[in-house]
Amino acid sequence: MNDSSKTSEADRTSQRKITLTDAYLLGSNLDYLRLAGANQWDIGGLEPELGGGYILNALRECIDVLSETDIDAPVVDEMAEFGEKLSEEYKANSNINSEDGRLLEQKANTWFDSLISELRKEKRIAVREHGLFDVERVLRHPEDLFREETWNWLSERCQDDISQACRCLAVECTTASVMIALRAVEDRLRIWYEAKSEKELNRGPWGTVLGNLSEEYKHDSDRPAVLTDLSYLKDRRNEVSHPQESPNWSEAEETIYRVRGTIERIYQEQE
């Protein structure tokens, strides 16, 4: 966290247009920061850490996206200053206190509103048709991916994640599509595992559930039917977490279908 994150007017001429993947990363990190402040979570390491998660890393990821894109929102400097404050006042991997937590929660909400205002100025992107994915139908009726009773069983957040994953795929934002689809299936896998085992999974950053289940069921032969696609889903998680790799259209499309299959199997097991 230093003054290098501040963006001059001259720098803006070389910045790229924001993508839906960028918008998703900003939204998910700001949502994380809001929750982290409210629950007084760990600030993380004072140096950048691979794998995301933690307050300082979430701030860094927001700053990186905003510094690279042409969104004209005066929040980058505020994020950098708040990150510097935490780095100076806290030891690594300590929890934010209640006062700073409330301040972070307020700031995250303010930053979110400011960015939404800027993003509303962006032009819409044309939808592309590919492969077996019926883009027009799924955009209008994402519930058609599932049996009616399965869709109705999903939480509102999970339904929204499925809908967003389909919209991102429609405009070829494959990384965002995979990330959101995996978040949806993680929600259902957590519920399934905790009901089955009467144990809680460790709660952590995005992708934790898939990692925990892979440790719990190390061998394919030990895995129940619900986890048939666990290895595939974990591979996709690792791919989109890597800064130099991204899924192609076919992989993102298959991820949505595999997520659907896993969710359907979870529901059927609970019937």
Image (cartoon, helix red, strand yellow):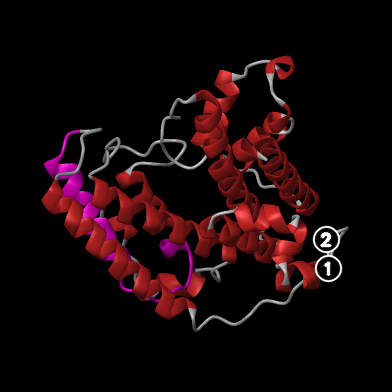
- 173 is within the stretch colored magenta: no
Residue pictured at 45% horizontal, 60% vertical: 26
**Disc number placed over residue 133 in the picture, else none:** 2
Residue 248 percent across, percent down from the top left? 75, 50
Along the line of sight, the residue nearer the viewer: 179 or 15: 179
> Of the residues shown, which amino acid type is indicated by label 2?
Phe
Residue pictured at 56% horizontal, 20% vertical: 215
Judge whether residue 79 can be spotted in this image: yes
Residue 9 percent across, percent down from the top left? 37, 76
Give the residue at the far front of this rendering. Answer: 271
> Of the residues shown, which amino acid type is indicated by label 1?
Glu
Which segment did they paint magenta?
65-91
Q: In which quarter of the image is the C terminus?
A: top right
What is the spatial separation of the Cα atoms under label 1 and label 2, in whole angstroms? 7 Å
- 76 is within the stretch colored magenta: yes
Residue 214 percent across, percent down from the top left? 60, 24
Along the line of sight, the residue nearer the viewer: 60 or 190: 190
Apparent side of residue 43 relative to residue 20 in the rendered image (left or right): left
Question: What type of secondary structure mainly makes up the magenta span?
Answer: helix
Apparent side of residue 4 relative to residue 228 in the rendered image (left or right): left
Residue 244 percent across, percent down from the top left? 61, 43
- Among the 4 quarters of the image, the one containing residue 117: bottom left
**Disc number placed over residue 129 in the picture, else none:** 1
